[in-house]
Amino acid sequence: MALPYFMRTRPVVHPLLLAFGLLICAKDENFAAKPQPQNTKAAASPAASAPASSPARPTTKPVVDQTAQVIIFGYHRFVDNVRHPDTEITPAAFEAQMKELKDRGITVIGMQDLLAWKRGEKSVPPRCAIITLDDGWKSQYEVAWPILKKFGYTHTMFIYTEGVQGGHFGGGQAITWEQLAEMRDAGVDIQGHTATHQDLRKPYDKVAKKRLSPPEYEQWLQNEVAGSKQLLEQRLGVRVNCFAVPYGFYNQHVKDVARNAGYEAMFTVYGQPITYNAPLDSLGRYLIEANKPKVFEDAVKMISTSSGGGGQPVAEVATTNLSTSPADGETVRTALPLIKANLSAIGPADPGSVQLRVSGLGLVPATYDPKTGTVAYQVTQKLREKTCTVILSVKSGGKKIEAHWTFGIDETGAAASKPLSPTPTPKK
Ligand SMILES: [Zn+2]
């Protein structure tokens, strides 16, 4: 069950006003308990074409692929001679992992893409990874970033503000504010990881070496969670909406404080594939360490074998190349659609390898005509959900290829029959 923090997109507001507004919202239990996936139905609702009186809500929403999966990796230091295998990795091992993502057809996306997907605003490719670098080490700027750029990957930096050079923990190996600004300018996502990187559940300030009274603890926690966010935002002119909890240690109170501070998502260190409905207040990351190479392997296998490929690399093909019907993002007026795709663009399919899966139905007996390259299936029992995902897999020259697309179903035709509403077009 997802517990979304904030379902609306926020215009730019003064951080204090924002925090105050969110504080009120967060105390409203109805708001907090509202189920998330309603967003996807907006396109079919009659209200969808209402004038833009509330700028916070887009008037139409694309139908997003709810079957995608995202794995998030966390790294710390990049060194040639590993002395602390729990936080270090060699540049060569890191580069090999980045290459493996590419080879396995796992798309590296940005953190904001993940959040937009979970808000129901856009689709992400079926299998994705996000690269996050923790704690602000200089080697992230000097070693990891050039490797990431080589692959064209974007990434997220989780920074604790006292760990930046000049801060209480910012020694010679720490990243500088100037380096962070340069990364920001290049599109790197910079997010929060507290002020002093301590266990937020404990009323003890290691920096001040002081046990904290309950009011002192609240003030300290506020500074760790909200104060550090504000500092990052003001120092770098960015919007910080993600919070990585140090060591993955948190409790409900820490979560509440983070939500009230305006974070949209919270990250732990318990890696797992992120699904569309995964709760935003505890998104698991895989922390990759030199002495546990299996963690990376297991993570990529978790999502690359989920299609039944048995660990075999799967190439994704864009549905626009397959002239699918219904098109990706389209809304149709029947719950008994004819589903079609044309495989000519990918070359000859191995006989008998064509498989078509439809959400709610599973594997269906689709026909494949090798002459025209057409795969077709006429749905014979009404699709019950308002969105339908199709997964087409095929082998061509021994290589497995997959395409995913999603369409909406609106039998009333309320969305399509509005005189001024344009013909739905595929969105990607
Ligand atoms: Zn950390």
Image: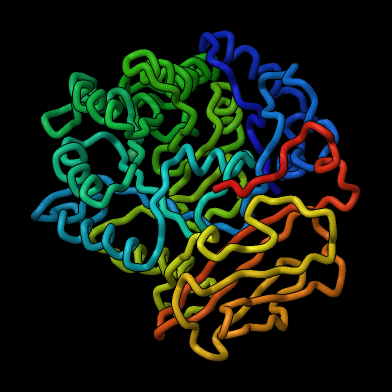
Q: Is residue 290 above or below residue 62?
A: below
Q: Choose top left, top right, bottom left or bottom right for residue 129.
A: bottom left
| Residue 190 % position (x, y) | 36, 30
Q: For residue 280, which quarter of the picture? A: top right
Residue 207: x %, y % from top left: 30, 23
Q: Which residue is at 26% across, 61% downward?
A: 99
Rendered residue at 42%/77% (across/down): 311
With respect to residue 7, does 105 lie above or below? Answer: below
Q: Is residue 217 left or right of residue 38?
A: left
Q: Quadrant of ligand 1?
A: top left
Q: Is 36 on the left-hand or right-hand side of 93?
A: right
203 or 172: nearer the eye?
A: 172
**Whole-percent x and y of residue 289?**
28, 57
Is residue 35 or residue 414 the one in the foreground?
414
- Furthest residue toward bottom: 351
Residue sitting at the far front: 371
Is 116 situated above or below 98? above
Which image quadrant for residue 214?
top right
Q: What residue is at 83 percent from the left and 31 percent from the top?
A: 47
Pick whichever, 48 or 162, lies toward us.
Answer: 48
Q: Residue visible at 69% across and 76% down?
A: 376
